[in-house]
Structure formats: structure tokens, C-alpha cells
Amino acid sequence: MQDRIFLSSPHMSDEGYEMQYVKEAFDTNWIAPLGENVNEFENELATKVGSKGAAALSSGTGAIHLALKAAGVDEGDIVFSSTLTFSATANPIIYQNAIPVFIDSDYETWNMSPKALEEAFEKYPDVKAVIVVHLYGLSADMDKIVELCKKHNVVLIEDAAESLGTYYKGKHTGTFGDYGVFSFNGNKIITTSGGGMLVSDNDERIAKARFWATQSRDQARHYQHSELGFNYRMSNVVAGIGRGQLKVLEDRVAKKNYVFNFYKRELGGLYGVEFMPSNEWNEPNYWLSSMTLYGKVRPIDVIDALEKENIESRLIWKPMHMQPYFEKYDFVGTDVSEKLFENGVCLPSDTKMTDADLERVIKIIKKLW
Ligand SMILES: *Cc1c(COP(=O)(O)O)cnc(C)c1O
């Protein structure tokens, strides 16, 4: 059996940057709790994306949770969320005892449909916040979404967990809304083994998020708490990995782009194949190369054929409004996200893949036609 090819696995720098920062943490015994790596990782990431402030947290999910809290979302509030996403986008809405309403995608972006969002605003005028996802590193149509949220005076949170390195009209995703969220989970474009970041231009809210993330300790000689707290802060060791990974982000984006164009060139002509959409305003990080199949060959045929040869691939996210846990909540839209789920497949997009690996993948797929 040949070596396994992964969908997207951790890829540390050849230069060993991550180890240098981790070693510094060890040498100074700043293993925990906070320390220079955490502060610098926040500064470096904020600078990279063009945001005023950032709070390093233990996960992207925790960052979404604190974004909702910072937005004032509380029990019984309505929150709109992209339906075509990973469950981590929607779970924090429930942590706050709020009520999700799921919004459909459009074919132009695969992301939140501005048209469906507009309909949702008409149906729920007292909505408290909107979470828009930038799926697989494609950006949503932010001009329209920002305009609608402004018009209705509603807080906008961007789940940019999959889109670090993605720009919309030259501006980094995660910086259009009131809050942006990044993830450094193991399969993301850069990873700290696990972690997340909340970004915002509102320094006061970022400071508040750090406060909540460290058990909401009041300024007092004894342990005093006037608010509910969370243990959501990133450790200084983990932040060291993040600082090193941030140095190679552009290399990772370039390689993901190469992988996507390789597949598109080799497979784009097969009957029924359509690759994820390109828009002139979108500069994606191509986190996962994805395509839809509208012919005889089904996504599961591709996944099974690759798995037989020890290659990992997977289906598109199953929309939240189709999930047993979330199906009791309302959904606004048509069948776009459902169709993308039925017909979509994510190809192995590991940045360590060689041309020979890519040839191996396309040969197996082409045999199915
Ligand atoms: C990975 C991911 C998250 C969650 O991030 P974690 O760091 O794993 O908690 C949230 N939303 C989307 C769209 C993701 O892909």
C-alpha cells in the first residue's frame, strides 16, 4: 500500500520557526499561563489581517462563543447563521441559549446568499446577530452582506476559521464585520495543534473577551467574580507554534492555489464536473479544493475509489438545517446548500503533496469516467 495522502494535515515550517518559539517558552519557563508568545501572536495576527485587536483563545469555537457574548447575544435572541458549514459555527448560538435561523447559500459563492439573508431580515426584524462563513477559503459576497447588516443595524460576525489568507477586494476576510474568528485546528491552513483567535477593531470588546476567557476575574486581591467566566485562553506554548506557522502562511496559500489549479486543469473537462466558483473580487486561500459532480459519477464513487488507494477525501459539509440536532430551527432559502451537499466532494488538498501525489489522485478519478 502506498503512503496515505491526507485531506489537509499539519505542515510545520522547514525552517523550524515553531520550535524556536516553543523553545523560548521552555527556556524562560513561560509554559503557562500567558506570556510573550501569546501577546506577540495576537499582535502578529492582527497586523497580518489588518485588525486593531485580537484575543488568542483555545479554539475557534470558543472565539465564536465570545463573539456572540461580545455582541450581546443572550437567551431567546435570534441569530442568523450560514447553513452550509461545520457545526462549530452554530453550536455556540445554543451555548448562549439563543435561537439559530439558518440561511441558504448561492451558487455564485457557495456562501450565504444575500437574497436569502434579505428575506430572513423581513421575517425576523428583531434578529440580534449574523454569522457569515467563508467556506473552504472562498469569501462570501461581503459588500452585499455588510450593507444588509448595516441597514438593519445588526452585529456581523465572520466565521473565517477556514479563510485565513483569503482576501475580498483586497481586504482580509474576518475584518468586514464587527468580529472575526480564526481557527488553528489540526486540519486548517495553519495550525497550532488547536486554538483560535477573535479579532475586532473594538479594543474594549477584545479586552472584555480576554477577561471572560480567563474566568472573569475582577480586579481584587482575592478571587472575585461578578460575571460568568470561561477557561478559553490560549497557552504560551501553543501560541509559539502559531507564531512560527504565521511566517509560512503565504507559502501554504500558494501551494493550496497550485493544488487547486492542478485539479482544475486535469479534471475540469470531465463531464458534469464543476469546480468551486471563482469571482473576480475573491482571492481565496483554497483551503480545500472542492468540486461538484452533476453527471453519472457520484461524490461517493470518488471518495470510495480514492480510499481504496489510501487517499483521504470527503463530502461537502452537511447543511445545519438538515442535521438531526438543528432541524427544528427555521431555515430561509431554497435547495442550493442541499444540492451542493448532495453533489460536492472535497479533494485531498494537503500542502505536502508532490506532483506525483497529485498525479496519483487524478489518475484514480479519471478512471471513473
Ligand atoms: C474548524 C472550524 C471551526 C471551529 O474551529 P475550532 O478551532 O476547531 O474550534 C468553526 N467554523 C468552521 C467553519 C470551521 O471549519
Image (cartoon, rainbow, N blue to C red):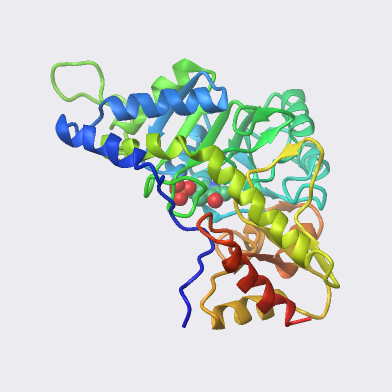
Question: What residue do we see at 58% from left, 64% from top?
Answer: 348
**Is residue 160 left or right of 27 when viewed as pictured?**
right
Is residue 31 visible to the viewer in this orientation of the structure?
no
The image shows residue 71 at horizontal and vertical percentages of: 54, 28
Q: Is residue 245 or residue 206 the one in the foreground? A: 245
The image shows residue 210 at horizontal and vertical percentages of: 36, 27
Task: Look at the image and tell me in which quarter the C terminus lies.
Answer: bottom right
**Is residue 45 left or right of 19 when viewed as pictured?**
right
Question: What residue do we see at 55% from left, 32% from top?
Answer: 180
The image shows residue 39 at horizontal and vertical percentages of: 34, 24
Determine the residue located farthest toward the front in the rendered image.
356
Q: Is residue 301 above or below residue 146?
A: below
Q: Is residue 320 above or below residue 195?
A: below
Question: What residue do we see at 77% from left, 27% from top?
Answer: 147
The tally of labels here is 0
**Is residue 355 left or right of 236 when viewed as pictured?**
right
